[in-house]
Image (tube, rainbow, N blue to C red):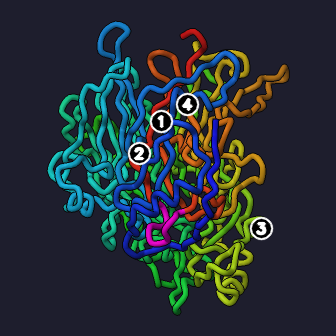
């Protein structure tokens, strides 16, 4: 049962704020008056910015709607920003569950997740903004914690540890449920230091007993997106290497212009277009901030630490090499952020293909766009060993980015926006809004022409829905609406840079199922439907519902159940809805709320 208070609404909008965090316990109380409350839901705050709170009580996941024949339960709660999960068999039916807590994961100015400040203000307390791995028994008993303490005042955090400034994104055993080495991806992407995050991404090997970290490949690109999720196949490790920018151009949204530019996987020719960040600063694509080189050729791997390294790509390296960095190959590229990846089974209709979930660009930076879809792709190398190409930054879901459907509408995160809270919905001054609509409509190409023919996606999802995990169902999970060979995928949901993708039923913060349907003539069609979503709210922290906030990973465990990792609550710029909005503009744009992460299990009924 819910009750509503009579407090007045004081929500405010903010652009990419770069000031100090706001404080004041009175703001916590004021904020609590703004939301409908669920009985027993705890008000949880960001300790450095106590105005930024969430209502948290996952219960047993009873507000998550799933098809008949399935049941939801909570395996672990109160976690700090979990992003990855892995399993290791111990003996018989027993297994260990490894849950990666990502740490400080949202780099955008001073967003309150400052590890050094936390250590100074809360000495002796565990820092929720540094990564670690919690190891549980299959029954949910915490066995050990790997990865802390780290020295959050240094870039490395110490020797043989995960980097403290985050995020760590994924963990996986090389032999799946059969174990082997435990791999992880980490970075200092979220550091506040200028250029501190450039080339800070790593693939590491983690001792599953002690937590000691050994670098496997270091100095990988880092900017908007670090090294992310893993897949293993045929003696290779594959990983998603997200783009360092939002749309192919370094802008003020990329560390104030300090982040490294994107790295192409093949030789490219730039267009004649340059892109405006204001104050006389213009940049070409695939170039440092403020550098214009219209019509120039940018050679493959320019700016990379190793040959074979590029971004907006799926990369791979040999698992058995003495120097794995010397074996890196681009497998597929032309993605803005091909975050989620998984190999289909060999006996599947996709015949072992690598499936990639790509997240499209936001409206922000020097080349802002609106409404770009997310897409599911099949990735493969060409017959000559070169990577195939999927069209980014000039194709969004195979559609030309210059189509008016992607025109920016103006928003507080656009480089040319001069913030004006009195001018909704853009919150830009009329003059700056007019400049955005003049310079960026239609969206201009980064490249003169594609480096090779473009591979079309398998299917599209809604703008800002955000693929974060995919996995193929085992036969033991098949029931009713889930057919043999089905694929489950997670849509994490938007971060509030643009308006919601739907008025009444926004896509995101949910799990969907893809059934592959064979016809008598040998053709295959896709049937896509909703599998799991809150039945009471978009994100549970808004109303205190017992459900999903930001699901980030999904893996089938040794028990045949779908294990769903939920990152937790984050306050955002609020373009997609006021209930998620940052309460104090100085806290913006994306303050995280520790202790709101959860691991859910979805199983067949009776199992």
Task: Assign a secondary structure to mark 3.
Answer: loop
Q: Residues within 10 Å of mark 1 (few under 14, many from 20)?
A: many
Closer to the eye: label 2 or 4: 2
Horizontal arrangement in the rendering, residue 148 relative to residue 179 (left or right): left
Kindly identify the residue that appears in the image at 30 percent across and 15 percent down: 90
Q: Is residue 386 visible?
A: yes
Lower position in the chain sequence, tag 1 or tag 3: 3
Lower position in the chain sequence, tag 1 or tag 4: 4
Horizontal arrangement in the rendering, residue 399 relative to residue 342 (left or right): right
Kindly identify the residue that appears in the image at 48 percent across and 55 percent down: 242
Which of the numbered marks, if any, corresponds to residue 403? Answer: 3
Which of the numbered marks, if any, corresponds to residue 458? Answer: none
Closer to the eye: label 1 or 3: 1
Task: Assign a secondary structure to mark 2.
Answer: loop
Q: Is residue 300 visible?
A: no
Task: Name the residue tied to disc 2.
Answer: 81
Q: Residues within 10 Å of mark 3 (few under 14, many from 20)?
A: some
Q: Magenta part mainly helix, strand or loop?
A: loop
Magenta residues (range)? 582-590
Q: Position of residue 264 (x, y in %)?
A: 49, 63
Kindly identify the residue that appears in the image at 71 percent across and 61 percent down: 371
For marks 1 and 3, give the CA distance. Answer: 36 Å
In which image quadrant can residue 108 be found?
Answer: bottom left
Task: Name the residue tied to disc 4.
Answer: 471
Task: Name the residue tied to disc 1.
Answer: 565
- Above or below, 393 relative to 511: below
Q: Position of residue 197 (x, y in %)?
A: 34, 64
Q: Position of residue 82 (x, y in %)?
A: 41, 41
């Amino acid at each position: 049962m819910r009750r509503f208070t009579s407090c007045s609404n004081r929500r405010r909008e903010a652009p990419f704020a770069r000031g100090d965090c706001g404080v004041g316990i009175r703001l916590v109380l004021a904020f609590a008056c703004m939301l409908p409350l669920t009985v027993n839901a705890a008000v949880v705050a960001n300790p450095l910015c106590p105005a930024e709170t969430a209502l948290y009580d996952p219960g047993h996941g009873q507000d998550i709607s799933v098809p008949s024949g399935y049941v939801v339960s909570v395996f672990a709660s109160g976690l700090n920003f979990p992003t990855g999960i892995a399993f290791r068999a111990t003996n018989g039916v027993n297994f260990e569950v490894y849950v990666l807590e990502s740490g400080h994961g949202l780099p955008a100015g001073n967003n309150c997740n400052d590890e050094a400040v936390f250590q100074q203000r809360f000495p002796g307390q565990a820092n929720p903004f540094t990564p670690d791995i919690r190891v549980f028994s299959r029954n949910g008993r915490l066995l050990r914690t790997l990865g802390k303490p780290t020295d959050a005042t240094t870039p490395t955090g110490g020797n043989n540890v995960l980097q403290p400034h985050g995020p760590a994104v994924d963990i996986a055993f090389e032999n799946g449920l059969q174990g082997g080495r435990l791999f992880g991806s980490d970075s200092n992407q979220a550091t506040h230091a200028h250029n501190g995050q450039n080339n800070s991404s790593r693939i590491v090997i983690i001792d599953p007993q002690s937590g000691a970290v050994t670098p496997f490949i270091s100095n990988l690109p880092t900017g908007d997106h670090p090294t992310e999720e893993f897949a293993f196949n045929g003696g290779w490790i594959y990983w998603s290497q997200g783009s360092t920018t939002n749309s192919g151009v370094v802008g003020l949204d990329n560390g104030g212009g300090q982040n490294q530019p994107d790295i192409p996987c093949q030789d490219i020719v730039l267009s004649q277009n340059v892109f405006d960040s204001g104050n006389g600063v213009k940049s070409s694509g695939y170039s440092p901030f403020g550098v214009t080189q219209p019509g120039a050729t940018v050679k493959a791997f320019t700016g990379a630490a190793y040959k074979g390294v590029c971004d907006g790509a799926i990369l791979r390296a040999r698992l058995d090499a003495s120097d794995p960095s010397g074996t890196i190959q681009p497998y597929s590229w032309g993605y803005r952020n091909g975050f989620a990846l998984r190999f289909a089974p060999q006996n599947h209709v996709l015949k072992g293909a690598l499936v990639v979930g790509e997240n499209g660009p936001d409206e922000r930076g020097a080349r802002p766009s609106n409404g770009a879809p997310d897409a599911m792709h099949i990735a493969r190398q060409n017959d000559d060993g070169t990577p195939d190409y999927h069209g980014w930054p000039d194709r969004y879901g195979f559609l030309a980015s210059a189509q008016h459907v992607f025109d920016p509408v103006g928003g507080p995160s656009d480089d040319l926006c001069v913030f004006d809270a009195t001018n909704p919905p853009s919150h830009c001054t009329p003059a700056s809004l007019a400049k955005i609509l003049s310079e960026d409509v239609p969206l201009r190409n980064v490249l003169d022409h594609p480096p090779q023919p473009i591979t079309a996606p398998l299917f599209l999802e809604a703008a800002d829905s955000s693929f974060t995990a995919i996995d193929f169902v085992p036969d033991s999970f098949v029931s009713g609406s889930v057919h043999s060979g089905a694929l489950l995928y997670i849509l994490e949901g938007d971060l509030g840079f643009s308006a919601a993708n739907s008025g009444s039923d926004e896509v995101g913060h949910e799990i969907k199922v893809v059934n592959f349907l064979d016809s008598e003539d040998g053709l295959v069609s896709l049937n896509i439907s909703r599998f799991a979503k809150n039945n009471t709210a978009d994100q549970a922290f808004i109303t205190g519902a017992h459900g999903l906030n930001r699901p980030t990973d999904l893996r089938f465990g040794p028990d045949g159940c779908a294990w769903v990792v939920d990152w937790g609550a984050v306050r955002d710029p609020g373009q997609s809805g006021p209930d998620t909005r940052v309460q104090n503009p100085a806290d913006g744009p994306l303050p995280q709320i520790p202790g709101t992460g959860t691991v859910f299990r979805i199983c067949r009924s009776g199992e």
